[in-house]
Amino acid sequence: MSIRIVVCLFVSLLCGCVEYHPYDTRVDGATDINAKNIARIERECKDLKELRFAVVSDSQRWYDELEQAVLEINLRSDIDFVIHAGDLSDFGMRTEFEVQRDILNRLRVPYVCLIGNHDCIATGKDIFAKIFGAADMAFTAGDVRFICLNTNALEYDDGSVPNLDFVEQQLLTMPRDVRRSVVVMHAEPLSDQFYSREVALILQQQLKCLPDLQFCVHGHGHKYKEEDIFDDGVTYYECDNVGDRSFLIFTLNNDGYECEKVDF
C-alpha cells in the first residue's frame, strides 16, 4: 500500500472522529428554513377563507416532547402551518439547533421559527440566522399578515431590539389584500426581556396600528395564559413550554378567531 493511500485513510479516519466545537457556526444540513417555508405558506394559504395554525414554544431540552408534539400535529389534517415561538436551544449550541430543526422537519406542514433569549447565547444568533433566517420576519396567509418579532432586548446591547423600524416598515408596505393581523414574539412586552415600560408602550402603539390586530402570541414564560396586559383590548396568549406537553391551535375565519390549548 502506498504512502499516499495510508495518509488518505488516516486523514479520513481522523476527520470522522473529530467533532466541531459546540459553538462552531459551521452548520450541517438544511439552512434558510424560514424563507423556504414562508414561500410555501403564502402559496398554499393564498386563497383560504379559514386558517388554522399551531404554536409550539420553548422546546429546549425537551426533544422527546417536541417529537411527540410533531406526531400529534401530523395526525391532524386541519393544520395549515406551525410557528415555533423561540428557545429551541438551551445554551445556543449548534447541535441543539440542528437536532431541533431535524425534528421539526418531520412536520407534514411548513413551519417557521422565532429566536428566543436562550437562542442568543454565545454564537446562537449566528447559528439561528444560518439555519432559520432573520430575527424579524413577516408573511401573509390568506388575508392575515403575520408579524414575527425578536423581543429579546436584554440579549442585545445596541438598542436594536425590538426593531421598531421593522414594524414601521411593515405598516408602510402592508399588502393591499391584508384585512387582519397577528403578532408573534418570544417574550411579551412587559417581560424581563424589555429594558423599560416606555419601549413596551411604544411597541404596543405600533402594533395597534396594524390592520385589525386579532391577538398576540408568545412563549418565554413556560406556562399557558391569556391576558390583556395593556388593558387595551389586545389579548396576549402565552404558549406553554413543550416539556409540559401542550401546544396552541388558532383558527381564524370570517367570524373571528378561536384559541385551543391542546394537551398531549
Image (cartoon, rainbow, N blue to C red):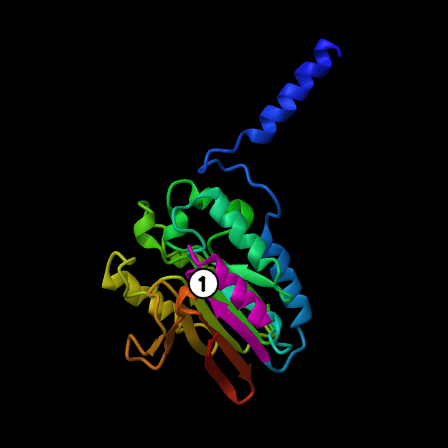
Which residue is depicted at the point 48% across and 35% down? Answer: 24
When asked about the image quadrant of residue 1, the answer is top right
Residue most extreme to the front: 1
Image location (x, y in percent) of residue 136 = 47, 56
Residue 104, percent from left and from top: 56, 59
Residue under circle 1? 85
223 to 31, vertically: above or below:
below
Asked whether residue 172 is in view, the answer is: no
**Is 219 drawn above or below residue 15 in the view shown?**
below
Stretch of the chain drawn in magenta: 51-73
Which residue is more in the foreground, 262 or 154?
Answer: 262
Q: Is residue 161 magenta?
A: no
Seen at 25% across and 56% down, the residue is 195
Label 1, secondary structure: give it.
loop
Q: Residue furthest bottom?
A: 255
Compared with 16, 33 (above or below) is: below
Find the residue positioned furthest to the right.
1
Residue 259 position, x and y percent, is 46, 81
Quadrant of the rendered image containing residue 12: top right
